[in-house]
């Protein structure tokens, strides 16, 4: 039992530093969250992963049911969740966003690179606002030039990415320990 516990602790020691600088944020995108709110039945979800050591930001967004093909998609800053929502400037345009009514978007941004953040936004200011829950993601199209669906980015389930990794690491280490014990 003591050895098993040691194995778990050792796995923790390996697993935690790998995730320590990864921060996750997520949002559900709905017409009801737009400014002004709309009755669109479209939905979307976004997962944003920030490596706070390198300022690399990975976006994974899925959406479906837009009333027209998407034109542009963004992260806007800086406003808290309000009712009714207000619109604030675009700070991170999603380059290469697909012009479809249902789809997926995956992209990694270097927040420190010129032209990635716009409207005077800088990486440190953006990151502090992201962490404070003051940014939102939305998707625009011809029917809703101001945005058809929108969601406020809030800290996501780091367990969603971190815990399976941790369990895998623990399982792998225990397996190694068991095999090693059999051989010995
Ligand atoms: Cu936008």
Image (spheres, grey):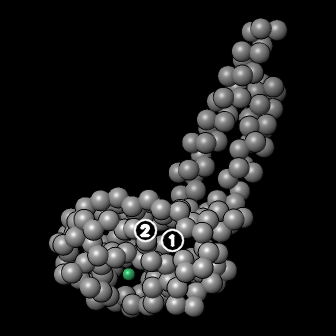
Left or right side of 166 for 140 = left
The relative height of residue 166 versus residue 29 in the rendered view (above or below) is above
> Of 98 and 148, which appears nearest the observer?
98
Query: Where on the picture, by quarter, is residue 31?
Result: bottom left
Residue 38 lies, in percent from the top left, at 22, 82
Which image quarter holds the N terminus?
A: top right
> Could you tell me which residue is drawn at 77 percent across and 15 percent down?
180
Residue 131 visible, this orientation: no
| Residue located at (17% from left, 72% from top) | 67
Q: CA distance from mark 2 to mark 1?
A: 7 Å
Camera sees residue 124: yes
**Crowd class of label 1 (few under 14; some 14 to 19; many from 20; radius 10 Å):** many
| 12 lies left or right of 22 | right
Q: Which mark, residue 27?
A: 2
The residue at 78%/13% (across/down) is: 181
CB of mark 2 within 8 Å of CB of mark 1?
yes
Q: Quadrant of ligand 1?
A: bottom left
Point out which mark residue 154 bears.
1
User: Can you give x and y, in whole percent of width and height, for residue 85 in the image?
Assistant: 37, 88
Disc 2 on helix, strand or loop? strand
Q: Is 84 or 101 nearer to us in this picture?
A: 101
Which residue is at 72% across, 64% downward?
Answer: 53
- x and y, in percent, of residue 179 in the image: 72, 15
Question: As drawn, is 32 to the left or to the right of 161?
Answer: left
């Amino acid at each position: 039992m003591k050895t098993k516990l040691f194995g778990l602790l050792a796995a923790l020691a390996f697993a935690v530093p790998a995730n320590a600088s990864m921060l996750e944020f997520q949002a559900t995108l709905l017409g009801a969250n737009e400014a002004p709110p709309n009755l669109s039945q479209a939905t979307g979800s976004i997962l944003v992963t920030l490596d706070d050591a390198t300022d690399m930001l990975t976006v994974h967004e899925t959406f479906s049911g837009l009333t027209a093909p998407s034109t542009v998609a963004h992260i806007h800053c800086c406003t808290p969740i309000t009712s009714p929502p207000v619109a604030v400037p675009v700070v991170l345009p999603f380059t290469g966003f697909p012009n479809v009514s249902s789809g997926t978007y995956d992209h990694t941004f270097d927040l420190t690179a010129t032209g990635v953040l716009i409207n005077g936004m800088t990486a440190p200011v953006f990151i502090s606002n992201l962490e404070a829950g003051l940014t939102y993601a939305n998707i625009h199209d011809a029917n809703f030039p101001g945005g058809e669906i929108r969601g406020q980015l809030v800290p996501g389930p780091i367990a969603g990415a971190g815990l399976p990794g941790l369990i895998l690491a623990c399982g792998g280490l225990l397996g190694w320990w068991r095999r090693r014990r059999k051989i010995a």
